Image (cartoon, rainbow, N blue to C red):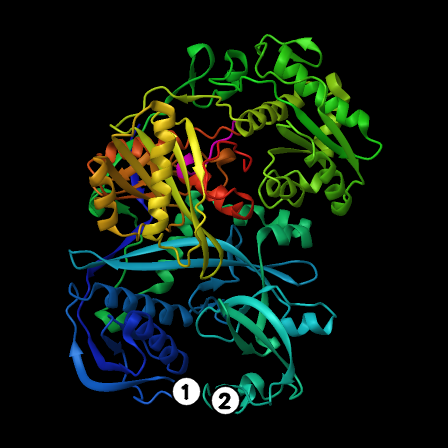
Amino acid sequence: MSKDLKMEIFASKETVKPVTFHVYEFHTSELYENKFKLIRSAVWKIKNINTCGVFENGKYIYTTEKIEENIPNTDFKLVYLGEKVLEVLENKKIYSELIRYYIVENLKKIKIYDHYRKYACKSNITSRWIMTEKGFQTFSSKDKQISLERKYNVAVYIQDNGKAYLKIDTSSIFSSNQTVADLIDQGVDPRGMEVKNEWAKNSQVGILKEICNYTVTDKIDFADSLKAYYEGTKKESYRVENLPDDTLVVTVELQPGKNYPYYPQALKPVLMREKVGQMDPAFSLSIERYVKRDMALRIELDKNFIQDIGKITQIGNLEFEQEMCQVADLDYKRGTIQLPVLTCGRNRELRCGEEFKVFNYGFYYKPEKKIKIGYIYPKNQINLMKAVANAICDFAANGRYHREKDAYIVEGLLDIQMKPIAIEEYALGDITDYKRAANHLRKIEDMDIVIGIVPDEMDDDGPYNPFKSIWAEANIPSQMVSVKTARLFERGKAEGNKTKYYLHNILLGILGKTGGIPWIIKEMPGNVDCFVGLDVATVEKGIHFPACSVVFDKQGRLLGFYKPKSAQRGEKITTKILRDIFDQVIFSYEDKFGDKPKSIMIHRDGFSNENDEWYQEYFGEKEIAYTIVEVRKNISSKLVLIEDGEIKNPTAGYCVYNKERAYLVTTNMKNKKGSPNPLLIEKKCGNISMGDILKQVFYLSQLHVGSTQKMRLPITTGYADKICKNREFVPEGKMNQSLFFL
């Protein structure tokens, strides 16, 4: 059996040929505190009123055609320096953007069935034409209010060999066929909605803030009116000439604190998959197979896309291969990592994928005190509550299922007080009444966790569940059980083994939220004493909150999580906050082991733009070795397994790597739906080998304690991300070991 591993990256057939650009010197009267930001802003403004390619290198602006030097309504000037041929390898960024620009230009010309434009090309490339076994079709809901679109994220980069490499990430998005103007006419208040500007050349997405008390013919800051702006500056009178002059302007927040005026006819709501499922469940179900694409279909879409790109005549007839790149051609080695062996109760070994056996072996560590549980349940449903409580207690304490001894459940899994410490009832679905009942429960001392029986649609135990957020705010761990699931417990033996899965996850949830540990890594590779996960909470575009950290020892045991008191703006963690975090990391390790760690592995969610010199000084003073690794989850490239000529999804543990960079698959796809998203792992500094780094990340992705289901992320950055999403409810300035955010 032959196996081959490739990457979803496509090389150009020839090297990139140099071309001639028009060169402009950039001048501005503004302070040069952030010249790069200013010049990028200038490029955006130039693109908005010109139809040519515009690029920058931080110093000069380059265009594919000569443009007017005086750009209206701007705070900068351009000085034309003439034409210049740019060397490719010295200007990789510009040529990457140039190639992408011409890709978009070529795609604009493609017609489907010789009539319809196939692609909508702005900053994003989308298509309403979806490839099926019957050819290309469009998919809209029955009422024509929702459409399925294919989105193509396209990135180009230049290698030292002079070739261009194309990354294509196909995904599915949903668009509304109604404009904000339509919604207003229907009496719908659009304020607070995420919207996108359909008239823009570049993608503009923001939050609709206000329906103004002035019209499109009234004066605005940067023009005589919004209508005049489209007729004059933008030269797009066709968009507005037939729209009423008494149309009220709406404002959209594109950047924090910066609101811009828009025609409501230009804006459409942004629809997420969850929202589509609520609006039209039948439509959502009917397009499932086109949303979750297996790897074979992805590659077919890629080939069709490359065929549509064709030759880029402006760059020496540049053309891309339709076959994916071999791993070796991209300077990577291929590898597979075996699943780790876990250790649970009574020092028993536990293999990944067989975590359910922990209920037969026992947990690695359980709270030493009796766990006292409070219950909140719907009015007149005390029997439902009793069924849930009895099932949990009998399972955890006595090793019984449906009141009978079960050979696969060990006695004494958890020491739970059989009688609830308190109970409260509420009107089902009434969040206000739920809060009232919750306030009564919150006053109970020594309550370790709350189990809430909630409406079926609220059975998601995530941080955004409004029933769960009440307990998170009170810093009390909680476990949600839907009424539908509770009914299964009530029916008992009649349901057979259906409820065993729910009991497994409920018990693991209770365990993790009360300080217990189901399992640990038996042997962690690499010379590391503890792992630290760092993340920065993002509220909305451009608005960030303090970094959160999670600390584990070398076997994956939680030492605590921490949110600093100090606030910050931006994604770069300040040195003050870094010191705050790592002081607490060291203190928590010393409390556990009696001495400071000798080696720390830092997993940074996203990009590590923090001060390198600070790390060197801080850890150098303490004689602690450290390694910083970026763990990035939103990437475009996928790994593709070719087995005996058949395209398949790679399984968990497949990876490609070099000394500094790697792609790692951490999950398996169920029922062959969709394709796995690998993590991008990049070493920023440190002496730990990439082989050991990959094993550590993979092993830590198998340690999620709140469920038998795995996480895609290692628990370092995975839990840090969960804490960030619960940022409002996480205690500040101290270590905490209660994983209530699970």
Callout 2: SS:
loop
Q: Which residue is mark 2?
A: 223
Q: Quadrant of residue 359?
A: top right
Q: Given the image, on which type of amino acid does mark 1 rest?
A: Asn
Q: Quadrant of residue 488?
A: top right
Q: Quadrant of residue 652?
A: top left
Viewer-side residue, 160 vs 693:
693
Q: Which residue is mark 1?
A: 73
Callout 1: SS:
loop
| Residue pictured at 55% horizontal, 86% vertical | 226
Q: Earlier in the sequence, mark 1 or mark 2?
A: 1
| Residue pictured at 63% horizontal, 18% vertical | 416
In the image, residue 178 sits, relative to residue 644, either above or below, namely below
Viewer-side residue, 46 vs 548:
548
Viewer-side residue, 633 vs 419:
419
Alpha carbon of mark 1 to alpha carbon of mark 2: how far?
9 Å
Let me know if residue 432 appears in the view.
yes
Stretch in magenta: 708-716
Hey, which residue is sitting farthest right in the picture? 380
Q: Given the image, on which type of amino acid does mark 2 rest?
A: Ala
Residue 209, horizontal then vertical, whole percent: 60, 70
Q: Is residue 644 left or right of residue 185?
A: left
Main SS, magenta residues: loop
* Quarter placement of the C terminus: top right
